[in-house]
Image (tube, rainbow, N blue to C red):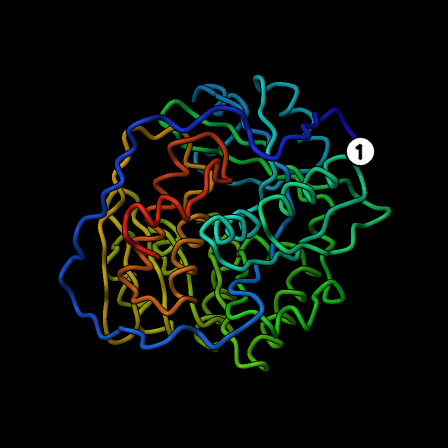
């Protein structure tokens, strides 16, 4: 492995989640609800196949003045080269290493909830690549993408967590950006109820081609395609292309947070952006932090409140785990309100710990909450 980035054999960062996290889910906000499903998505080998950047995260506590001094936009994600990665790593405080990547976190969350999950993403045959492969398989996710034997090192994301729990990400894509259509396992895509793609994958052109190839395969097999918009800065880069993917039906189900939604439609008015999304998308999930989340279609909206937590420790992975919870319910044939609650529970659990992979089985928490049997 190039550079001085540390390795850790363990699959999860140390430290238990704070005690006393509330497990209640309040009642559904009474809005339109024509979405009751009578049966799950048709039987498949996988519930969710996630495709995205295979990354090892390095998380460190940081003050806001460090972000300012190093030209970082708080709460955003910046793509950096290896030299910048080395400089940031040298300057940041002690770090905790844990396998990450947005779509990979979602796959791990689905598996933690008892679902059948797979992942496609590229690493190099180096130290961090070995750690990534071990960790995602240990999480119960099917992963068999061949590692690159040469070229850039395995990707890593340097995550600075400020005292309010907000995370600022500096991502060196490395080998992850070399995902190509040949890496897409057609049989695996065709076997998955939902193929879930991360917006970050839209940055490298070869990965974009892989993204589109996977969508064609999924639709050809009668499956669904979901897209996470990933980050408001990512939306800024590819706004027109993302809107085309949604309007043209390449994507069946969109995941976004409030900031990403506003960026997509270039407005500060949330309600106006939601109207535009309902006009364009077949189905969408919109998260609003403490304001809860909604499932929307052109005809109706279902909303639930946020899952109560005692303390926000680290928001890394909150959106990824929300998607995991929702998709678990969605592919089981649960109604949207219950699927949203599963998402809220998974996100609430993850922000009460450091790192974006669950440190205890989410299925146990979901059963305690009466959301799944």
Q: Can you give x and y, in whole percent of width and height, for residue 247 in the image?
A: 43, 75
**Quarter placement of the C terminus:** bottom left
Q: Quadrant of the N terminus?
A: top right
Q: How many marks?
A: 1
Question: In the drawing, does residue 143 fall left or right of residue 318?
Answer: right
Instruction: Please tell me which residue is depicted at 49% across the width and 25% down the height of the picture.
Output: 67
Q: Position of residue 184 (x, y in %)?
A: 70, 66
Q: Quadrant of residue 298?
A: bottom left
Residue 57 sits above or below residue 334 on the image: above
The 10 Å Cα crowd at callout 1, few under 14, some 14 to 19, many 20 or more, is some
Location of mark 1 (residue):
1
Q: Nearer the viewer, residue 150 or 83?
A: 150
Coordinates of residue 64 in the picture (x, y in percent): 43, 22
- Is residue 216 or residue 69 the one in the foreground? 216
Decide: is 173 above or below 144.
above
User: Judging from the image, what secondary structure is the residue with disc 1 in?
Assistant: loop
Residue at position x 23%, y 58% from top? Answer: 303
Q: For the view shown, which residue lies furthest in the left direction? A: 30
> Can you name the residue that lies furthest to the front here?
373
* Lateral position of residue 148 relative to residue 17, left or right: right
- Rendered position, 89 above or below 360: above
Front residue (pair 333, 201): 333
Q: Residue at x 56, y 40 (%)?
A: 78
Q: Position of residue 56 (x, y in %)?
A: 63, 38
Q: Quadrant of residue 182?
A: bottom right
Question: Measuring 51% from the left and 21% from the top, which residue is drawn there?
Answer: 69
């Amino acid at each position: 492995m190039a550079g001085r980035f540390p390795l850790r054999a363990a699959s999860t960062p140390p430290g238990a989640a704070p005690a006393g996290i509330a497990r209640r889910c309040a009642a559904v906000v009474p809005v339109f609800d024509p979405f009751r499903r009578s049966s799950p998505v048709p039987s498949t080998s996988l519930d969710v196949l996630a495709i995205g950047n295979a990354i090892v995260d390095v998380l460190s506590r940081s003050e806001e003045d460090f972000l300012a001094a190093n030209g970082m936009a708080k709460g955003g994600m910046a793509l950096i080269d290896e030299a910048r990665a080395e400089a940031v790593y040298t300057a940041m405080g002690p770090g905790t290493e844990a396998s990450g990547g947005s779509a990979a976190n979602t796959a791990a969350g689905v598996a933690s909830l008892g679902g059948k999950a797979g992942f496609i993403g590229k690493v190099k045959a180096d130290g961090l690549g070995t750690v990534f492969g071990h960790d995602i398989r240990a999480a119960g996710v099917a992963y068999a993408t061949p590692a690159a034997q040469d070229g850039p090192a395995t990707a890593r994301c340097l995550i600075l967590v400020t005292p309010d729990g907000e995370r600022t990400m500096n991502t060196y894509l490395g080998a992850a950006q070399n995902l190509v259509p040949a890496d897409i396992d057609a049989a695996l895509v065709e076997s998955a109820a939902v193929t879930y793609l991360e917006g970050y994958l839209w940055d490298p052109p070869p990965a974009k081609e892989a993204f589109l190839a996977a969508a064609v395969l999924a639709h050809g097999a009668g499956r669904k395609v979901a897209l996470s918009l990933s980050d408001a800065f990512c939306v800024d880069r590819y706004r027109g292309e993302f809107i085309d993917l949604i309007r043209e039906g390449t994507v069946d189900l969109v995941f976004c947070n409030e900031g990403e939604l506003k960026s997509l439609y270039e407005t500060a008015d949330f309600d106006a952006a939601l109207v535009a999304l309902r006009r364009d998308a077949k189905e969408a999930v919109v998260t609003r932090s403490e304001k809860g989340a909604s499932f929307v279609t052109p005809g109706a909206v279902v909303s639930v409140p946020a899952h109560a937590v005692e303390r926000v420790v680290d928001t890394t992975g909150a959106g990824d785990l929300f998607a995991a919870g929702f998709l678990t319910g969605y592919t089981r044939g649960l109604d949207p309100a219950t699927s949203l609650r599963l998402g809220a529970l998974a996100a609430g659990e993850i922000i009460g710990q450091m790192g974006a992979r669950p440190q205890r089985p989410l299925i146990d928490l979901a059963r305690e909450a009466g959301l799944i049997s």
